[in-house]
Image (spheres, rainbow, N blue to C red):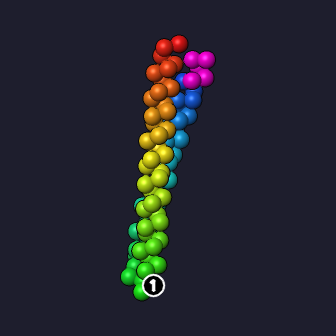
């Protein structure tokens, strides 16, 4: 059981790291949107940026939650 919980903790940490990497792609995309269609009269650029920023926030939240899972799993595995 200890090994299974430790493995779950490790997978949670790795998934968190993958989400952080994905967030970096959103940051690049935001810059591209601003550079490509920045100042759109229809506010399309602002709407797209707002949606991407909301997604970034969710990725941060998910990453933090996964790190919490990892931490708790390690604590629990240490008690077994």
Residue projecting furthest to the bottom: 41
- Numbered marks: total: 1
Q: Residue furthest left?
A: 39
Q: Looking at the image, which residue is at 61% across and 17% down? A: 1
- Quadrant in the picture for residue 40: bottom left
- Residue at image coords 51%, 19%: 77
Q: Is residue 3 above or below residue 62?
A: above
- Left or right: 12 in relation to 43: right
Q: Considering depth in this image, is 38 or 51 the residue closer to the camera?
A: 51
Q: Is residue 23 magenta?
A: no
Which residues are drawn in magenta?
1-5
Q: Position of residue 38 (x, y in %)?
A: 40, 79
Residue 9 location (% of width, % of height): 52, 29
Q: Position of residue 13 (x, y in %)?
A: 49, 36
Relative to residue 77, is residue 9 depicted above or below? below
The residue carrying mark 1 is 42
Instruction: Report the front residue among 37 and 58.
Output: 58
Q: Secondary structure at mark 1?
A: loop
């Amino acid at each position: 059981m200890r090994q299974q919980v430790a493995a779950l903790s490790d997978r949670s940490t790795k998934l968190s790291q993958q989400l952080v990497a994905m967030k970096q792609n959103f940051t690049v995309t935001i810059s591209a949107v601003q550079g490509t269609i920045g100042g759109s009269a229809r506010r399309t650029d602002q709407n797209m940026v707002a949606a991407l920023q909301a997604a970034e926030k969710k990725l941060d939240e998910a990453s933090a939650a996964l790190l919490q899972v990892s931490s708790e799993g390690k604590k629990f595995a240490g008690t077994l």
